Amino acid sequence: MANSLPIWKVYCLMAALVVVGAVGACIAKLQGLQRVDSGDRWEHPWFQAFAMFVGEILCLFYYFIEKYLDKRKYGPRGLHPRIHEARRQGLKTRINLFMFAIPASCDAVATAMIYFAYLNIPLSVAEMMQGALVLMTTCASVIFLGKKFFLYQWGSLVFIVGGICLVGASSIKNDKGTDGNPVLGVCLMLGALLIQSAQLIVEEKLFRTYYLSPLKVVGFQGLFGICIYLVFLPIAYFIKCGGDLCPAGRLEDSLMALRGLKENYILLILVIALMIDISVFNTLGNSVTKYASCANRATINTVKVVLVWIFFLIYWGEGQEHFHWLQFGGFILIVIGTFTFNYMKDKQLTQQEEESAASYRPLVAEVNKSDNIISPSTTSDRERFVSI
């Protein structure tokens, strides 16, 4: 099938998503801890988000290489076997590129809000709070995508929400890990997750409607994101403000951000590394959305908190975190809920697939007798045949 992979490959994508996501989160936090010649920390969330989109647009380069190689192997695009399979499944093979501006806009706002949150709360707390994305995305999937989840899956969300409450309380009670405002950080993080949930729903809807390469989706999101920030950043430079939302005295001082990159080569390396990491991370994320679902992507993504938490416990330097039992309790609940949600879902889906395959065997036998040619008389029969 055009939008399917062997289950072990899907699990490999999920594992890679966790590792790459944890690395990116650590790099983003370390960027904000770097100091420039003036002695101040390099705090430029909007510029960081712009750099992320620059990394995403690199995926277009790899997409066009992939497209060129496929064209050499299969000829015109219409002759590609995956295109034929996609059409048989009712997927559209052409899309208005401006559709990618919708998730790009969500990504632009949510990413900047997350980077602001990183300045105000410990990174492990911010990452643990991403468990809220699971609840938001699951509810949105039911409302907007018409999905159904089982009772024990909803039960696992209770663990995740309970963990979020403990982690949020830990951030407010133990606010020595950062110099910022922990309450503001928690609010920014929750707002960003709500926007990210909308982005995930839109992306899954696109994959359900169109046959798309994850590289293409990420690349064009990067293109539209860059266009948005090229308009926004000059305006933000002239908006003067103070407080935790304007650490540089302006909403965003891109010139100061560039000077900081020139003064601190380690910072420059971190920015380039994050650009590469983000391009890989978002490609993996869209692959999980395509071959599994946005709910799977949201739940699996919370597991990266384990790696982030361990890294900043053993990290020696500014930004090192300290062990707190309240935070640890929240961490345990989130991980238990995440694994329960995905394990039970996969187990149930496997059972359904086996039952479905058993009911389709007579149809498969009929196909074999007729040299694999079949003309289903109804839409229902056709869908059953394609799903084999």
Image: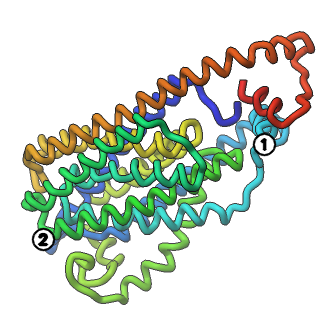
The picture places residue 384, in percent across and down from the top left corner, at: 76, 28
The picture places residue 241, in percent across and down from the top left corner, at: 27, 87
Q: Amino acid at mark 1?
A: Gly
Residue ID for mark 2: 39
What is the number of the mark on residue 289? none
**Residue positioned 8% across, 43% down in the render:** 325
Q: In the image, 246: left or right of 101?
A: left
Q: Nearer the viewer, residue 152 or 239?
A: 152
- Indicate whether 100 appears above or below 243: above
Q: Quadrant of residue 310?
A: top left
Q: How many marks?
A: 2
The picture places residue 329, in percent across and down from the top left corner, at: 16, 42
Q: Name the image quarter holding the C terminus.
A: top right
Q: Is residue 26 visible?
A: no
Name the residue at the front extreme: 151
Residue ID for mark 1: 90
